[in-house]
Image: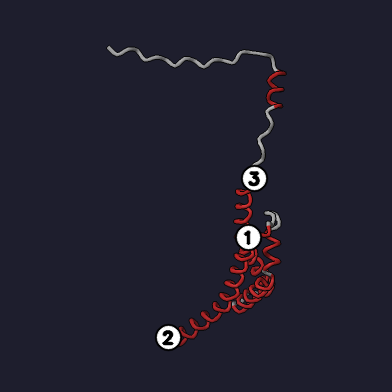
Amino acid sequence: MIGLLAAVTINLAGLQASISAPTDAFRSCLREAASKAKTDKVTADGIEAYLRNACTAQMGSLKEALIAFRIKNGMSRKDAASDANMTVSDYVSTPADNYKFLANMNAPKAAAAPAAPATQAAAASPATPAPTPAAAPKQPPKP
């Protein structure tokens, strides 16, 4: 019984290791590509395609490892491929979302609208005096 448990544990550890190396390689490639995209001044809209193109080899090996792992665990090939694509998309979306957020934060702010339309609108309206704020109530003197 203990021998069977040890054999299963060793087998699962070996299967997990077959996924760890491609996952680590893909994630490190995504980090390097995201930092390179900053120097290449990639637009926020094009970052996801940039990351996928930069890490094509690592992405392919990760997909293959995920599909093989899931098939060994009893999943159909079609479902395993769909799940692997979803996993890869999740890995790509995190650095892409971070890049988009930082690109929007670092983008120059749009210039304020010119004041001319506001003065034209004020000139078009009839001249009415602006209401004066009500005077603050005074406290009665202390006895």
Q: Nearer the viewer, residue 129 or 11?
A: 129
Establish if 48 lies above or below 71: above
Q: Which residue is mark 2?
A: 2
Residue type, mark 3 in image: Pro
- Label 3 secondary element: loop
Labelled pair 2, 1 in contact (Cβ < 8 Å): no
At mark 1, the secondary structure is: helix
Disc 3 marks which residue? 108
Q: Is there a contact, CB below 8 Å, between mark 3 and mark 2?
A: no
Give residue 131's quadrant in the image.
top right
In this rendering, which labeled residue sits more in front, label 3 or label 2? 3
Q: CA distance from mark 3 to mark 1?
A: 24 Å
> Going by the image, does 119 lie left or right of 133?
right
Front of the two marks 2 and 1:
1
Report which quarter residue 30 is drawn in.
bottom right
| CA distance for labels 2 and 1 | 43 Å
The local secondary structure at tag 2 comes to helix
CA–CA distance between discs 3 and 2? Answer: 64 Å
Q: Residue at x 69, y 31 (%)?
A: 114
